[in-house]
Protein backbone atom coordinates (compact mmCIF):
# COMPACT_ATOMS: atom_id res chain seq x y z
CA UNK A 1 0.00 0.00 0.00
CA UNK A 2 1.39 3.39 -0.97
CA UNK A 3 2.11 5.80 1.87
CA UNK A 4 -0.35 8.64 2.24
CA UNK A 5 0.77 12.15 1.10
CA UNK A 6 0.30 14.53 4.04
CA UNK A 7 1.50 17.80 5.54
CA UNK A 8 3.06 17.93 8.98
CA UNK A 9 0.25 20.23 10.18
CA UNK A 10 -2.31 17.49 9.45
CA UNK A 11 -0.46 15.05 11.75
CA UNK A 12 0.03 17.23 14.83
CA UNK A 13 -3.03 16.00 16.73
CA UNK A 14 -2.30 12.30 16.20
CA UNK A 15 0.96 12.04 18.17
CA UNK A 16 2.42 13.17 21.51
CA UNK A 17 6.02 13.24 20.31
CA UNK A 18 7.82 13.88 17.03
CA UNK A 19 11.26 12.42 16.35
CA UNK A 20 13.17 14.32 13.69
CA UNK A 21 16.10 12.92 11.79
CA UNK A 22 18.72 15.67 11.37
CA UNK A 23 20.41 15.54 7.96
CA UNK A 24 17.94 15.57 5.09
CA UNK A 25 15.00 16.59 7.31
CA UNK A 26 15.96 19.53 9.58
CA UNK A 27 19.21 20.46 7.87
CA UNK A 28 21.91 19.55 5.42
CA UNK A 29 25.59 20.31 5.80
CA UNK A 30 24.98 23.87 4.62
CA UNK A 31 22.32 24.78 7.20
CA UNK A 32 18.63 24.46 8.07
CA UNK A 33 16.16 23.23 5.45
CA UNK A 34 13.05 25.28 4.54
CA UNK A 35 10.24 24.99 7.08
CA UNK A 36 12.36 23.30 9.76
CA UNK A 37 12.33 26.20 12.25
CA UNK A 38 8.59 26.71 11.80
CA UNK A 39 7.85 22.98 12.16
CA UNK A 40 9.63 22.71 15.51
CA UNK A 41 8.14 25.97 16.81
CA UNK A 42 4.63 24.93 15.76
CA UNK A 43 4.83 21.53 17.44
CA UNK A 44 6.20 23.02 20.66
CA UNK A 45 3.44 25.63 20.67
CA UNK A 46 0.99 22.71 20.46
CA UNK A 47 2.61 21.14 23.55
CA UNK A 48 4.33 18.32 21.67
CA UNK A 49 7.69 16.77 22.52
CA UNK A 50 10.23 17.30 19.73
CA UNK A 51 13.48 15.33 19.71
CA UNK A 52 16.31 15.13 17.21
CA UNK A 53 16.99 11.42 16.67
CA UNK A 54 20.19 11.29 14.67
CA UNK A 55 22.91 8.82 13.77
CA UNK A 56 25.50 11.61 14.08
CA UNK A 57 28.31 10.22 16.24
CA UNK A 58 30.95 12.69 15.09
CA UNK A 59 30.60 14.74 18.30
CA UNK A 60 28.85 14.68 21.72
CA UNK A 61 25.11 15.49 21.96
CA UNK A 62 25.91 18.88 23.54
CA UNK A 63 28.00 19.82 20.49
CA UNK A 64 25.14 18.74 18.19
CA UNK A 65 22.78 21.00 20.17
CA UNK A 66 25.31 23.87 19.84
CA UNK A 67 25.43 23.42 16.09
CA UNK A 68 21.62 23.55 15.89
CA UNK A 69 21.71 26.70 18.07
CA UNK A 70 24.02 28.39 15.58
CA UNK A 71 21.45 27.52 12.91
CA UNK A 72 18.67 29.21 14.89
CA UNK A 73 17.09 26.16 16.58
CA UNK A 74 16.54 26.10 20.35
CA UNK A 75 17.41 22.46 21.04
CA UNK A 76 19.20 21.66 24.29
CA UNK A 77 21.32 18.57 24.95
CA UNK A 78 18.15 16.92 26.37
CA UNK A 79 16.48 17.24 22.97
CA UNK A 80 19.26 15.35 21.18
CA UNK A 81 19.10 11.55 21.02
CA UNK A 82 22.20 10.64 19.01
CA UNK A 83 23.83 7.31 18.27
CA UNK A 84 27.03 8.72 19.79
CA UNK A 85 25.10 9.54 22.94
CA UNK A 86 24.35 5.82 23.35
CA UNK A 87 28.03 5.02 23.89
CA UNK A 88 27.92 5.73 27.62
CA UNK A 89 25.21 3.17 28.34
CA UNK A 90 26.70 0.66 25.87
CA UNK A 91 30.14 0.81 27.51
CA UNK A 92 28.61 0.62 30.99
CA UNK A 93 26.49 -2.40 30.04
CA UNK A 94 29.51 -4.24 28.61
CA UNK A 95 31.95 -3.25 31.37
CA UNK A 96 34.31 -1.47 28.96
CA UNK A 97 35.61 1.21 31.33
CA UNK A 98 39.24 1.97 30.45
CA UNK A 99 39.31 -0.57 27.62
CA UNK A 100 41.71 0.19 24.75
CA UNK A 101 39.73 0.72 21.55
CA UNK A 102 40.38 1.76 17.97
CA UNK A 103 37.86 4.58 17.48
CA UNK A 104 37.21 5.80 13.91
CA UNK A 105 36.22 9.46 13.91
CA UNK A 106 37.47 13.03 14.36
CA UNK A 107 38.80 14.45 17.64
CA UNK A 108 35.34 15.31 18.99
CA UNK A 109 34.28 11.68 18.42
CA UNK A 110 37.37 10.43 20.27
CA UNK A 111 36.53 12.81 23.12
CA UNK A 112 33.01 11.35 23.18
CA UNK A 113 34.45 7.81 23.32
CA UNK A 114 36.79 8.82 26.11
CA UNK A 115 33.96 10.35 28.13
CA UNK A 116 32.06 7.07 27.68
CA UNK A 117 34.98 5.27 29.38
CA UNK A 118 36.96 3.96 26.39
CA UNK A 119 40.69 4.46 25.97
CA UNK A 120 41.23 5.31 22.27
CA UNK A 121 44.50 3.95 20.85
CA UNK A 122 46.16 4.26 17.43
CA UNK A 123 45.78 1.74 14.60
CA UNK A 124 49.18 0.18 15.36
CA UNK A 125 48.26 -0.68 18.94
CA UNK A 126 46.33 -3.85 19.81
CA UNK A 127 42.86 -2.57 20.67
CA UNK A 128 40.28 -4.78 22.33
CA UNK A 129 37.52 -3.56 20.04
CA UNK A 130 36.83 -1.29 17.05
CA UNK A 131 34.21 1.48 17.21
CA UNK A 132 33.10 3.26 14.01
CA UNK A 133 31.73 6.69 14.89
CA UNK A 134 32.39 8.74 11.77
CA UNK A 135 33.97 8.70 8.31
CA UNK A 136 36.27 11.70 8.91
CA UNK A 137 39.37 12.38 10.98
CA UNK A 138 41.76 9.52 10.19
CA UNK A 139 44.10 8.17 7.54
CA UNK A 140 41.44 6.17 5.74
CA UNK A 141 43.07 3.13 4.12
CA UNK A 142 45.64 2.25 6.84
CA UNK A 143 43.04 2.71 9.59
CA UNK A 144 40.41 0.56 7.85
CA UNK A 145 43.05 -2.10 7.14
CA UNK A 146 44.16 -2.11 10.79
CA UNK A 147 40.56 -2.21 12.02
CA UNK A 148 39.76 -5.21 9.80
CA UNK A 149 42.92 -7.02 10.91
CA UNK A 150 42.13 -6.52 14.61
CA UNK A 151 38.52 -7.69 14.26
CA UNK A 152 39.45 -10.79 12.24
CA UNK A 153 42.10 -11.65 14.85
CA UNK A 154 39.63 -11.33 17.71
CA UNK A 155 36.49 -12.80 16.18
CA UNK A 156 35.00 -15.49 18.41
CA UNK A 157 36.01 -13.80 21.65
CA UNK A 158 33.16 -12.79 23.97
CA UNK A 159 31.15 -9.69 23.16
CA UNK A 160 30.99 -7.50 20.04
CA UNK A 161 34.36 -6.72 18.42
CA UNK A 162 33.03 -4.21 15.86
CA UNK A 163 30.61 -1.59 17.17
CA UNK A 164 28.97 0.46 14.40
CA UNK A 165 27.73 3.53 16.22
CA UNK A 166 26.49 5.34 13.07
CA UNK A 167 25.09 2.76 10.60
CA UNK A 168 24.29 5.32 7.84
CA UNK A 169 25.86 4.25 4.54
CA UNK A 170 25.44 7.65 2.86
CA UNK A 171 24.42 11.16 3.90
CA UNK A 172 23.04 14.16 1.96
CA UNK A 173 25.66 16.87 1.33
CA UNK A 174 23.24 19.39 -0.17
CA UNK A 175 22.68 20.40 -3.80
CA UNK A 176 21.67 16.81 -4.62
CA UNK A 177 25.07 15.33 -3.78
CA UNK A 178 25.62 12.56 -1.23
CA UNK A 179 28.66 11.33 0.65
CA UNK A 180 30.10 8.21 2.25
CA UNK A 181 29.03 7.75 5.88
CA UNK A 182 30.36 5.61 8.71
CA UNK A 183 28.09 2.61 8.07
CA UNK A 184 29.51 2.31 4.55
CA UNK A 185 32.92 1.79 6.13
CA UNK A 186 31.48 -0.96 8.33
CA UNK A 187 30.20 -2.73 5.21
CA UNK A 188 33.64 -2.43 3.63
CA UNK A 189 35.27 -3.99 6.71
CA UNK A 190 32.70 -6.82 6.75
CA UNK A 191 33.34 -7.46 3.03
CA UNK A 192 37.13 -7.43 3.54
CA UNK A 193 36.80 -9.95 6.39
CA UNK A 194 34.47 -12.13 4.29
CA UNK A 195 37.00 -12.13 1.45
CA UNK A 196 39.51 -13.40 4.01
CA UNK A 197 37.01 -16.18 4.83
CA UNK A 198 35.85 -14.77 8.16
CA UNK A 199 32.22 -13.85 8.88
CA UNK A 200 32.35 -11.04 11.45
CA UNK A 201 28.58 -10.53 11.46
CA UNK A 202 28.12 -12.30 14.82
CA UNK A 203 30.87 -10.10 16.31
CA UNK A 204 29.28 -6.86 15.02
CA UNK A 205 26.71 -4.71 16.80
CA UNK A 206 24.90 -1.54 15.68
CA UNK A 207 23.66 1.30 17.92
CA UNK A 208 22.04 3.85 15.58
CA UNK A 209 19.01 3.71 13.26
CA UNK A 210 17.60 1.35 11.97
CA UNK A 211 18.54 -0.66 15.07
CA UNK A 212 16.55 -0.71 18.29
CA UNK A 213 18.90 0.94 20.84
CA UNK A 214 18.42 4.50 19.54
CA UNK A 215 14.61 4.17 19.25
CA UNK A 216 14.54 2.71 22.74
CA UNK A 217 16.48 5.73 24.02
CA UNK A 218 14.15 8.11 22.16
CA UNK A 219 10.89 6.69 23.55
CA UNK A 220 12.43 6.63 27.03
CA UNK A 221 13.48 10.28 26.67
CA UNK A 222 10.06 11.29 25.30
CA UNK A 223 8.27 9.12 27.87
CA UNK A 224 5.79 7.97 25.21
CA UNK A 225 5.54 5.45 22.40
CA UNK A 226 2.88 7.54 20.68
CA UNK A 227 5.56 9.13 18.53
CA UNK A 228 6.08 9.77 14.82
CA UNK A 229 9.54 9.35 13.30
CA UNK A 230 10.23 11.80 10.47
CA UNK A 231 13.17 10.80 8.31
CA UNK A 232 14.62 10.97 4.81
CA UNK A 233 16.20 7.51 4.56
CA UNK A 234 14.01 4.44 4.10
CA UNK A 235 16.61 1.91 5.25
CA UNK A 236 17.39 3.63 8.55
CA UNK A 237 14.62 6.06 9.59
CA UNK A 238 11.51 4.43 8.14
CA UNK A 239 12.22 0.70 8.40
CA UNK A 240 13.86 1.17 11.80
CA UNK A 241 10.91 3.04 13.28
CA UNK A 242 8.38 0.57 11.85
CA UNK A 243 10.33 -2.43 13.15
CA UNK A 244 10.36 -0.78 16.59
CA UNK A 245 6.59 -0.31 16.43
CA UNK A 246 6.47 3.42 15.71
CA UNK A 247 4.74 5.22 12.84
CA UNK A 248 7.04 6.84 10.30
CA UNK A 249 6.84 9.67 7.78
CA UNK A 250 9.23 9.96 4.87
CA UNK A 251 10.30 13.57 4.29
CA UNK A 252 11.43 13.91 0.67
CA UNK A 253 14.13 16.56 1.18
CA UNK A 254 17.07 14.18 1.57
CA UNK A 255 18.09 10.75 0.28
CA UNK A 256 14.87 8.84 -0.51
CA UNK A 257 11.98 9.97 -2.71
CA UNK A 258 9.42 7.25 -2.00
CA UNK A 259 8.67 4.64 0.65
CA UNK A 260 5.78 2.23 0.56
CA UNK A 261 6.89 1.18 4.05
CA UNK A 262 6.17 4.64 5.53
CA UNK A 263 2.78 5.56 7.00
CA UNK A 264 2.97 9.01 5.39
CA UNK A 265 4.99 10.92 2.82
CA UNK A 266 5.73 14.64 3.29
CA UNK A 267 7.16 16.54 0.33
CA UNK A 268 8.92 18.80 2.85
CA UNK A 269 8.37 20.29 6.32
CA UNK A 270 6.70 23.35 4.77
CA UNK A 271 2.93 23.30 4.40
MG1 LIG B 1 18.92 11.75 7.23
Image (cartoon, helix red, strand yellow):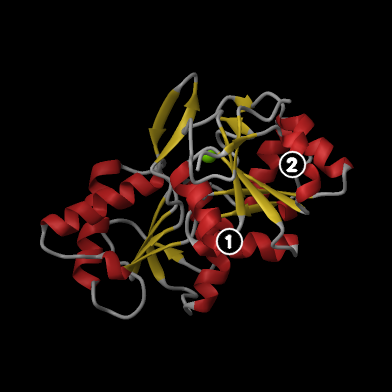
Residue that carries the numbered disc 2 in the rendered image: 11
Residue 67 visible in the current orientation: yes
Q: Earlier in the sequence, mark 1 or mark 2?
A: 2
Q: Position of residue 10 (x, y in %)?
A: 76, 37
**Residue at left 12%, top 55%?**
195
In this view of the protein, which residue sits in the foreground, 30 or 117? 30
Residue that carries the numbered disc 1 in the rendered image: 245
Residue positioned most to the top: 175
Q: Is residue 160 left or right of residue 173?
A: left
Dot 2 alpha-carbon crowd within 10 angstroms: few under 14, some 14 to 19, many 20 or more: few
Residue 104 higher or lower than 162, as above or below = above
Q: Identify the element where label 1 is drawn.
A: loop
Residue 231 higher or lower than 113, as above or below = above
Q: Position of residue 51 (x, y in %)?
A: 70, 49
Q: Identify the element where label 2 is drawn.
A: helix
Residue 108 is tagged as: none
Amino acid sequence: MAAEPRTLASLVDAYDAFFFDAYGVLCDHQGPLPGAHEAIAGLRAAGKTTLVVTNDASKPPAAIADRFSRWGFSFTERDIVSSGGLLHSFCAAHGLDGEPALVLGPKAALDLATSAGLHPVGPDAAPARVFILDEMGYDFVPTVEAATHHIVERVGRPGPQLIVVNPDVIYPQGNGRFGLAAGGIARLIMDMAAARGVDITPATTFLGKPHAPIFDAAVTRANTRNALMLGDQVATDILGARAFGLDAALVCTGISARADEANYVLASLTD
